[in-house]
Every structure is written in structure tokens, then in C-alpha cells.
């Protein structure tokens, strides 16, 4: 049994001093501590140019560039941020470097190196230096998936999950199985079949069936601990079924074994029926997202006769008559389903997959109709009369009911936009971002002279040193006397403010830009 070893990043004195300078700058610019990066992205770019090895500011600027659709430079900064952590982390924390690229099973610990294979390496996100590492890894995984690098996104996601699999603080389990399904690489895997199979599908099946990962949640109101296996998450239940279905199509032996209870095709059907039974509201949502015509009938797929049993409006609201915990569970389950359908609907859009999903749903409906007939015949005492009669359309339809685990409340606060396939971009003007000021931040030159002289432009380094020794009010009085202004002449504007913000403020008659002489009357 492996031991747990917890690691925490320890920053150097120089790094901590740079962090202090950034927080001070952010507080001065944003008037609220920590708000400066959002209010003045140009100041953030200038700070990154002067301090090119501060991971926190690099990550913030990278995400700003992504949100203004400057993905090239954003990716460069994100890679620089990851490089900083790669050089800082010890080899025992980093994933092992192995020549086996077909690591589809979970026999080897994802976060253990060969030097520390007997220990489970964990990192606590609640420690402040560690939070940025988790955020960087999540952004690497997220952007890799957006650009189609699904194997890379899967590898980073597995490593991120392994750092804290009990709590999953970044919500990796909401998206990890998508990267596995989207990664269509084939690999040789012993123990399942003797030919090449899809690496991602095999990973999903073994992770779910190994029972290594559980979902844990501690209710802050009742202090009750809830947990559930991975298969009780809607996305993993459906992903396991689809993974088994894909392997069954690649396994000739499984297709030849028509009556074998262990065939992959039979297991895939059972897994999908189980997923549809637990989460029936997923079926109409998937069809809607894929623009499937569910109004017309056909001989192959008669959706109008099936969907009433899976309709969200017809699903029983089992939590309405219970307490707050049940309503929170229902809301959290619907939230997870919304994220799942939003990102996963494309992998369920193939024609053969839709036909397979319809056949499984049709079997479920026929079984439900048979149960209703038996119940009606038992109540009326005429079992033989109603056993073979077809169900009338006007008869009451007892729809399937979704059953969510209370442990899913752990993911109730996850933002669905973080799991989309693209960022919601804004024009640079919306953030008052001057893209020309980003160029110095991209030119990595740690030996150049610093340019971030907040509030003391064109006054020399001597005045900058004097500002640390003098009182702020006395210094402002001295500056007013230099430019010939009195104390009540008006508001002094910082010339380093965003250009749009500075221009609008300068229109006020009492405003004066610092360092600019007033017009002669």
C-alpha cells in the first residue's frame, strides 16, 4: 500500500518580493487590492515585461490575451508559465518520463516517478503558492483540448487529477472522459484483446471498473459526508457505455461471440441502459444539441414514441417533496448534465451511435410498457386480457426518473463556460488593452532596464527612491508646486491609466493629467 506525501511550493525571497510589488501595484491601480489586473491590463503587461519570471502575472496576462482572441501570444505566455513550474518542481512530483507511449491502463501511478514509485504524491491547493500551479495545469489542459490536442489534454488532465484525486478541486472529472473519447489513437493493450484498441476508450473502462476514483462531498450545512463511485456521474456513465461500444466494433472476437455474456457488445448495451435508467433526461438533451429530428417517424428510429418516457417535463420531481438536501442534489445533477451535454454531444452524433442509442432506449420503453400492463392486469384481475394488447397513446406514461447522488454537489459551483470548446472573446477595446504594450512582455529580456515607473514617469530614479522615504502627502504638495497648482485646483490624473479611461477623465474641466502643463489662459 502506497504512502501519501504532500508537497508545497516554497517561493524564494526575490519571488515573494516581486509578488508583493505586484499586489501593491494592483491595489494602487484598481483602488481595491487584487483588482488592478482587471482594471488596467496595460499595467499588467508592463509589469510582466519588467518581471518575466512571475508565474501569477504571466498566467493572468495569458488569459487576457486568450479572451481578446490573441491566442498565439497567449499560448506563448502559458508555455512560459508552465516552464517555470517544470523547473521548480522536483522530479518526484513530475510525471515519469517513459518510452511506453501506450500507457492506457492504470497499473502505474500517473504522478509517480521511478525514484518514488512507492509513494502517492499529492499537493494541497489550499496552500496559496500551490493554487497557481493547479490553475496553470487546468489552462494547459483546457487550451490543448480547444486546439484539438486531445492526447496532450488527456495527459495533463490525468496528472492534474492525480495531484488531488479525492477532492478534484479543478473539476477535471467533468471533462477528462471527453478528451479520452476524442483521442482516437490506437494502442496494443494486454488483458482485454490481442489487437490494437482505442487508447482513450480502454482508459475510461479500466478507470471506472477499477474503482480507484470516488466522488466525495462534505455538506457544509449538515456536516454529512457523501460519496459515490465514478459511474454515478452522468458523463462517466455514458462515456463508459460509448467506450465499450467502440471497443466492441473493433473486436472481431466479441462480434463472433453472439451468446457470450462477457462480450463487449453485450456489456456496452447493459452500460447504456443503466446510464439511461439513472439519467433519462440526457437523451432528449443530446438529440436537441445534435439537431436530430424527433418529430417525424421512420422505420429505423421512431423517436416520437420513445421520447415521452424520457421527456424532462414528464420526469417525476422526486425532490420536490423532500428537504433542502434533495433539492440541492437535483440542481447539482442538472448542472453536471448541462455541462456534459454541452461538450459531449458531438461524440454522440454519429449515425451508428444514434441507432444503437435508439435500440437501447426502445428496449427500455418496451420493458416499461410491459411492467405497466402487468400492473394494470393485476389490479383489474384480467391478466390474460391485457398482456398482449398494445399500449394506447392516451394511456398514462410513467416516465423514467433521474437519480442523482448527493456527492455531485461538489461540482455545483463549476462554471460551464470553462468546459466549452472555445473562449468567449471580447474586442481589445472592451478591456482598454493596447496590444502594442504586450510586445515588451513577449520579448523575454530579463537584463533590460525596467520600465514600470508607476506615478513617477519622467522624474528619474532619484525621485523614485525619495518617494519611499517621504510622506505621500508631502510629495504630492511638492509636485503641485512644481507645476504651479494649488491644493484645491482639481484632480490629478495618472498618465499611465488606460487610454480610453484617461481620455474620458480628461474631459472634465477640473481634471489635470500629471506631467502635462495646463493650457495658458
Image: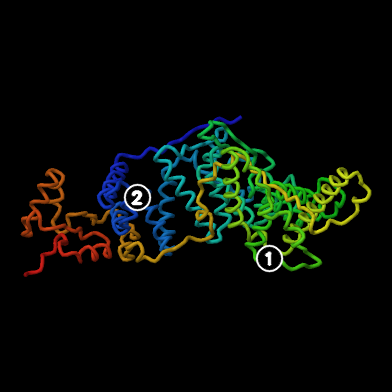
Q: Which mark is residue 319?
A: none
Indicate the position of residue 5 as horizontal and vertical percent values.
Answer: 50, 32
Which sits in the foreground, 42 or 450? 42
* Residue at image coords 56%, 31%: 224
Of labels 2 and 1, earlier in sequence is: 2
Q: Is residue 337 left or right of residue 361?
A: left
Residue at 65% across, 48% down: 236
Answer above or below: position of 107 versus 48. Answer: above
Q: Is residue 113 visible?
A: no
Front label number (2 vs 1)? 1
Residue 53 numbered tag: 2
- Tell me the quarter of the image containing the C terminus: bottom left
Q: Name the element at disc 1.
A: loop
Q: Label 1: which residue?
A: 292
The residue shown at (85%, 51%) is 257
Camera-nearest residue between 341 and 45: 341
Quick check: 465 left or right of 160? left
Query: Which part of the image, by quadrant, shows the N terminus?
Result: top right
Residue 60 in sight from this viewpoint: yes
Among all residues in the image, which is located at the extreme right?
384
Q: Whole-percent x and y of residue 441?
A: 33, 58
**Residue 469: percent from the left, percent from the top?**
13, 43
Secondary element under disc 2, as helix, strand or loop, is: loop
Q: Position of residue 339 (x, y in %)?
A: 57, 53
Amino acid at each position: 500500500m502506497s504512502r501519501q506525501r504532500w508537497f508545497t511550493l516554497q517561493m524564494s525571497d526575490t519571488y515573494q518580493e516581486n509578488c508583493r510589488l505586484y499586489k501593491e501595484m494592483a491595489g494602487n491601480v484598481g483602488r481595491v487590492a487584487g483588482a488592478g489586473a482587471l482594471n488596467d491590463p496595460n499595467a499588467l503587461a508592463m509589469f510582466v515585461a519588467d518581471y518575466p519570471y512571475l508565474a501569477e502575472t504571466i498566467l493572468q496576462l495569458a488569459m487576457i490575451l486568450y479572451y481578446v482572441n490573441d491566442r498565439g501570444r497567449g499560448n506563448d505566455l502559458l508555455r512560459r508559465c508552465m516552464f517555470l513550474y517544470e523547473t521548480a518542481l522536483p522530479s518526484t512530483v513530475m510525471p515519469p518520463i517513459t518510452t511506453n507511449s501506450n500507457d492506457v491502463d492504470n497499473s502505474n501511478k500517473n504522478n509517480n516517478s521511478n525514484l518514488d514509485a512507492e509513494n502517492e504524491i499529492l499537493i494541497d491547493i489550499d496552500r496559496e503558492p500551490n493554487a497557481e500551479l493547479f490553475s496553470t495545469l487546468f489552462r494547459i489542459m483546457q487550451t490543448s483540448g480547444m486546439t484539438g490536442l486531445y492526447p496532450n489534454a488527456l495527459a495533463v488532465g490525468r496528472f492534474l487529477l492525480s495531484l488531488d484525486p479525492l477532492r478534484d478541486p479543478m473539476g477535471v472529472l467533468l471533462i477528462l472522459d471527453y478528451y479520452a473519447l476524442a483521442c482516437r489513437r490506437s494502442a496494443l493493450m494486454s488483458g482485454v484483446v490481442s489487437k490494437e484498441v482505442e487508447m482513450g476508450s480502454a482508459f475510461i473502462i479500466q478507470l471506472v471498473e477499477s474503482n480507484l476514483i470516488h466522488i466525495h462531498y462534505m455538506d457544509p450545512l449538515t456536516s454529512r459526508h457523501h460519496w459515490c463511485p465514478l459511474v454515478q456521474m452522468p458523463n462517466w456513465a455514458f462515456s463508459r457505455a460509448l467506450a465499450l461500444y467502440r471497443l466492441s466494433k473493433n473486436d472481431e472476437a466479441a462480434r463472433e461471440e453472439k451468446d457470450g455474456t462477457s462480450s463487449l457488445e453485450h456489456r456496452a448495451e447493459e452500460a447504456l441502459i443503466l446510464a439511461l435508467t439513472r439519467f433519462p433526461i440526457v437523451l432528449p438533451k443530446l438529440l436537441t444539441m445534435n439537431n436530430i429530428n424527433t418529430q417525424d417517424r421512420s422505420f429505423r428510429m421512431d423517436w416520437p414514441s420513445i421520447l415521452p418516457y424520457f421527456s424532462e417535463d414528464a420526469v417525476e420531481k422526486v425532490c420536490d417533496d423532500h428537504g433542502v438536501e434533495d433539492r440541492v442534489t437535483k440542481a447539482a445533477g442538472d448542472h453536471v448534465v448541462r455541462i456534459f451535454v454541452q461538450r459531449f454531444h458531438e461524440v454522440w452524433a454519429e449515425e451508428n451511435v444514434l441507432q444503437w442509442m435508439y435500440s437501447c432506449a426502445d428496449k427500455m420503453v418496451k420493458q416499461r410498457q410491459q411492467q405497466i400492463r402487468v400492473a394494470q392486469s393485476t389490479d383489474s384481475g384480467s391478466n390474460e386480457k391485457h398482456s398482449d394488447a398494445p399500449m394506447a397513446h392516451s394511456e398514462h406514461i410513467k416516465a423514467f426518473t433521474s437519480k442523482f447522488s448527493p456527492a455531485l454537489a461538489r461540482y455545483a459551483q463549476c462554471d460551464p463556460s470553462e468546459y466549452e470548446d472555445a473562449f468567449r472573446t471580447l474586442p481589445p477595446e472592451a478591456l482598454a488593452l493596447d496590444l502594442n504594450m504586450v510586445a515588451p512582455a513577449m520579448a523575454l529580456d530579463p537584463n533590460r532596464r525596467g520600465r514600470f515607473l508607476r506615478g513617477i514617469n519622467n522624474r528619474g530614479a532619484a525621485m523614485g527612491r525619495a518617494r519611499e522615504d517621504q510622506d505621500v502627502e508631502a510629495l504630492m504638495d511638492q509636485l503641485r508646486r512644481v507645476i504651479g497648482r494649488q491644493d484645491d485646483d482639481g484632480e490629478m490624473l495618472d498618465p499611465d491609466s488606460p487610454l480610453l479611461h484617461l481620455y474620458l477623465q480628461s474631459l472634465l474641466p477640473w481634471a489635470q493629467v500629471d506631467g502635462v502643463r495646463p493650457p495658458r489662459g
